[in-house]
């Protein structure tokens, strides 16, 4: 089984990459299940119903999130009606939404997805190391393949989560920093790990936002309004190959595609489709 994870989708530039390039990417890599972090998909902050529905229509099977999940008020209602949109499982009891989901691939295989959020330099939620085990156990009887998105600031906390779950899940991939790391590996007991998948959006930016206002905040300490940038859109993420009989990962590959590269894959996909027809 091949699982594609798409790093944080940021604003319209990120959405455009998904709309125009995802299907070609999925076909090129023979992807069975696509997961994407979508918490920054609405103008860089939060998600709306229309945007979430569009991302699902474009081929994403499950959307994960993190600390920006509530930035748009309508997400409070949307997350209660769309089970394929996850919020971190370690939010306290009573918070809308869910922290895990089991999706069926086109050929009927099951993939479990779990979303948790770190506490170092972030909102002090419930203990993610305890909660993640509970979520995994709640879906293990329905899915041998289990993917975990750990949305966290501290590299050490994400690395710790990888070791904590080695042999218990198929993959642990970090999100939140919008900067792709180069430490992908298969841990000793068969869990694929990457500290941060990176960002799907404008890379000529400061983690997705226009450079000038972001830089002004560092230079002056004064509040500024952040707007998504537009230059050099790239799709960051990772592809995990896994044995669906054991749940172990066999390979993890980082990906970083420009808009032009995705356009080329889309053309190839169209040509192949026409040839088969």
Image (cartoon, grey):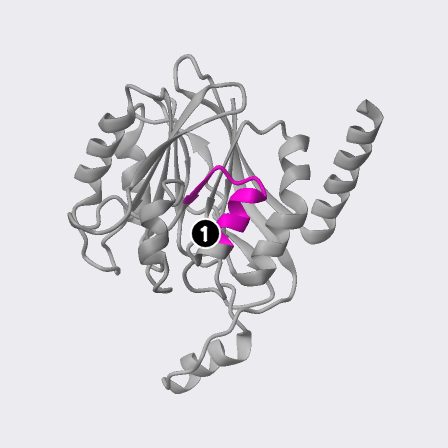
Q: Which of these two is toward me, 238 or 140?
A: 140
User: Which quadrant does the C terminus fall into?
Assistant: top right
Q: Please provide percent x and percent y for residue 148.
A: 35, 36
Asked whether the viewer can see residue 14, the reply is yes
Q: Please provide percent x and percent y for residue 228.
A: 53, 69
Asked whether the viewer can see residue 151, the reply is no
Q: Residue at x 51, y 69 (%)?
A: 209
- Mark 1 lies on a secondary structure that is loop
Q: Which portion, as a residue range, is magenta?
A: 51-63
Q: Which of these two is toward me, 200 or 20?
A: 20
Badge 1: how crowded within 10 Å, few (<14), some, or many (20+)? Answer: many
Q: Which of these two is toward me, 151 or 26?
A: 26
Task: Judge from the rendering whether residue 188 lies leftward or rightward of residue 20; answer left or right.
Answer: left
Q: Please provide percent x and percent y for residue 128.
A: 22, 43
Task: Judge from the rendering whether residue 76 lies leftward or rightward of residue 108; answer left or right.
Answer: left
Query: In the image, is residue 194 above or below residue 154?
Result: above
Q: Residue at x 57, y 39 (%)?
A: 59
Q: Residue at x 36, y 40 (%)?
A: 83
Q: Is residue 204 magenta?
A: no
Q: Residue at x 23, y 28 (%)?
A: 138
Q: Is residue 53 magenta?
A: yes
Task: Judge from the rendering whether residue 73 lies leftward or rightward of residue 30; answer left or right.
Answer: left
Q: Which of these two is toward me, 230 or 108?
A: 108
Task: Judge from the rendering whether residue 268 lies leftward or rightward of residue 184; answer left or right.
Answer: right
Q: Please name the residue that numbered disc 1 is placed on.
A: 38
């Amino acid at each position: 089984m091949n699982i594609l994870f798409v790093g944080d989708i940021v604003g319209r530039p990120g959405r455009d990459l998904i709309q125009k390039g995802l299907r070609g990417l999925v076909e090129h890599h023979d992807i069975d299940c696509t997961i994407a972090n979508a918490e920054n998909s609405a103008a860089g902050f939060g998600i709306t119903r229309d945007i979430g529905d569009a991302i699902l229509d474009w081929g994403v099977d499950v959307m994960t999130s993190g600390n920006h999940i509530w930035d748009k008020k309508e997400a409070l209602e949307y997350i209660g009606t769309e089970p394929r949109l996850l919020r971190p499982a370690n939010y306290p009891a009573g918070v809308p939404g869910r922290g895990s989901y089991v999706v069926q691939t086109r050929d009927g295989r099951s993939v479990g997805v779990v979303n948790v959020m770190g506490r170092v330099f972030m909102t002090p939620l419930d203990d993610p190391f305890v909660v993640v085990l509970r979520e995994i156990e709640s879906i293990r009887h329905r899915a041998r393949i289990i993917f975990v998105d750990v949305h966290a600031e501290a590299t050490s906390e994400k690395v710790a989560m990888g070791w904590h779950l080695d042999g218990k899940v198929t993959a642990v991939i970090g999100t939140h920093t919008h900067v792709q790391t180069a430490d992908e590996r298969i841990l000793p007991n068969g869990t694929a790990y990457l500290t941060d998948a990176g960002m799907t959006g404008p890379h000529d930016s400061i983690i997705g936002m226009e450079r000038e206002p972001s830089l002004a905040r560092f230079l002056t300490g004064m509040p500024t309004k952040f707007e998504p940038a537009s230059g050099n859109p790239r799709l960051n993420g990772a592809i995990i190959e896994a044995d669906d009989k054991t749940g172990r990962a066999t390979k993890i590959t980082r990906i970083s595609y420009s808009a032009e590269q995705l356009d080329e894959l889309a053309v190839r996909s169209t040509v192949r489709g026409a040839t088969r027809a």
